[in-house]
Image (cartoon, rainbow, N blue to C red):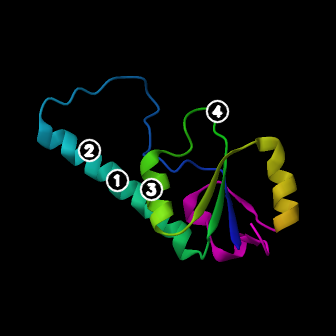
Amino acid sequence: AKIGLIQFCLTAPKTDIEGQVVVSEYAAMDRILREERKHILKLCKKIKKAGCNVVLIQKSVLRDAVNDLSLHFLAKMKILVVTNVERTDIEFISRTTGAKPVAHVDSFTAEKLGSADMV
């Protein structure tokens, strides 16, 4: 298995400011959902392109690291997902699998992947 160890969220980006957005028409809401879907699919495709078939996702204290849509896309791509990996376990996983922790999707490459004979 080719194992990826990620420290970024597989969800739509959130703004840095607190606030509310009120969407009054269906077309605008549909456009927002379509953009979110496209963003998440792009993240998942980058993970697949690196050759990863198992992804370990570090637990996020700020927000959910994954959502149902990203889990759906990864499952369709035949990628096993382990969520909520504790920060304290990252170093051990890195040493045992050879996977390098990746903080941004643009840095996710085949060279950063670890391996295991059985998962």
Residue drawn at the location 13% of the way across and 43% of the way down:
27
Neighbourhood count class around disc 1 (C-alpha, 10 Å): few under 14, some 14–19, many 20 upward: some
Q: Residue at x 76, y 63 (%)?
A: 100
* 75 or 105, nearer to the observer: 75
Q: Amino acid at mark 3?
A: His
Q: Gap between marks 4 and 2, in whole Å? A: 25 Å
Secondary structure under tag 2 reads helix
Q: Which mark is residue 57?
A: none
Q: Which residues are magenta?
A: 98-119
Q: Which residue is mark 4?
A: 61
Q: Closest to the observer: 53 or 27?
A: 53
Nearest the viewer among 70 and 99 is 70
Q: Does dot 1 land on a helix, a strand or a loop?
A: helix
Counting residues from the start of the chain, the first of labels 2 and 1 encountered is: 2
Q: Earlier in the sequence, mark 4 or mark 3?
A: 4
Residue 109 position, x and y percent, is 63, 72
First in sequence: mark 4 or mark 2?
2
Left or right: 66 in relation to 55:
left
Residue placed under numbered mark 1 in the picture = 37
Mark 3 residue element: helix
Q: Dot 3 corresponds to which residue?
A: 72
Q: Which mark is residue 32?
A: 2
What residue is at 60 percent from the left and 50 percent from the top? 8
Residue at 43% over, 27% down: 17
Residue 7 falls inside the magenta stretch: no
Task: Give the amino acid at mark 4.
Answer: Val
- What amino acid is found at the position of numbered circle 1 in the picture? Arg
- What is the three-letter code of the residue carrying label 2? Ile
